[in-house]
Amino acid sequence: MKYKYVFGPVLSGRLGRSLGLDLTAATICSMDCLYCEVGRTAVLTTERKAYVPAKAILDELAHWQEHVGLPLDAVTLGGSGEPLLNTEFGEVIRGAQRIMPSVPVAVLTNASLLVEPEVRRELAQADIVLPSLDSLVDEEFAAVNRPAQGVTTQAVADALLAFRSEFAGRIFLEVLLVAGVNDSEENLRRLKAFVPLLRPDRVDVVTMTRPGAYTEAKAVPRESLERWRRELCADIMQAVGQSSSALSANLLTKQEIQEIVQNSVRRRPQTVAQLAQATGLSAESVREALDILSRTGGVRTIAAPAGESGSEQASAQDGPYYSAGRR
């Protein structure tokens, strides 16, 4: 079965081996972030509706569990857009917990929809919530996140604090820095004051490691990144390499490996090394899958995407980038 809404598993520095659930199936979001690896937002909105029916997502998840059933560290609501825009995301959380009762359910979010009490109540059913908050300076917030009309810095910050008071699970806060945009001293000062109020279980300060939606988005220098991490007491995400947690190609058919690889490049262009890191497959298995997919038109090679520079981004020795081919 080819999955439309279930993708992965991928290896995450924060969640381990994570199976993704796509709740919008298109780049529908309340922000159009400079750095977004999925690409530019096609529909910029705060309108909530059932973009993908919960039943369709859960049917695929149940099928995956029955027919693939690899060990997982998390099931993560995320995908192509902002998952909280889907009015049925709470049903997806409950369904995932029912299908995989021993696996934590995590939700990625830009936190903009947390201004709505109903959204906070539904989200509180999750085990782990991973909000992003890139700047508390209004001009920087507008520049880096490019939010939909009505989404403000203060409203997002206040909503996060309200959610913290209502949520018994774990919060993993992420701050993504773009050089010359949100890496100011004023933003650092404000975030240092805010983080203790939010009381997250961990903080991750990161920069771009893959091409973003807009060419002006560049990685910050390593020394700047390390300073921000020290100042915000951030956990440094460890590079996920080939280890005992890596997916074993022996447990997967060649078709399943190809689907994992193809689903990954549909979301962002990647090199062999990046695909191996993201999926947990060996580089050899990735290359074999890419070779077959290249011949059948499932993937294509592209030049190094614009914005692919900076201390933490891929080097030329990683080889060509692969993107989705014809569908």
Image (cartoon, rainbow, N blue to C red):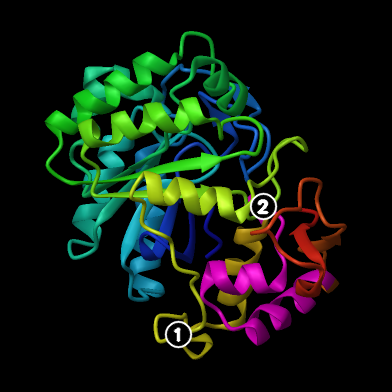
Q: State the CA–CA distance, disc 2 to disc 1.
A: 24 Å
Q: Is residue 86 visible?
A: no
Q: What is the x, y in percent for residue 324?
A: 74, 56
Q: Position of residue 87 (x, y in %)?
A: 35, 27
Work out whether mark 2 precedes mark 1 in sequence or the reverse, and give the earlier one.
Answer: 1
Q: Is residue 322 left or right of residue 284?
A: right
Q: Nearer the viewer, residue 132 or 48?
A: 132
**Residue identified by numbered label 2:** 268
Percent of width and height locating residue 115? 31, 17
Q: Residue furthest bottom?
A: 250
Q: Is residue 270 above or below residue 118?
A: below
Residue 291 is inside the magenta segment? yes
Helix, strand or loop under label 2: loop
Q: Which mark is residue 30?
A: none
Camera sees residue 151: yes
Q: Which residues are magenta?
A: 266-294
Q: Is residue 292 above or below residue 45?
A: below
Please identify the dominant SS of the magenta region. Answer: helix
Identify the amino acid type marked 1. Ser
Residue at 45% x, 36% y is: 52
Nearest to the eye among marks 2 and 1: give it. Answer: 1
Viewer-closest of 298 and 188: 188
Instruction: Please tell me whether residue 194 is drawn above or below residue 252 in the rendered image.
Output: above
Residue identified by numbered label 1: 243
The answer to which of 166 and 249 lies nearer the viewer is: 166
The image position of residue 45, as x and y in percent, is 53, 18
Q: As displayed, is residue 2 above or below residue 46?
A: below
Disc 1 element: loop
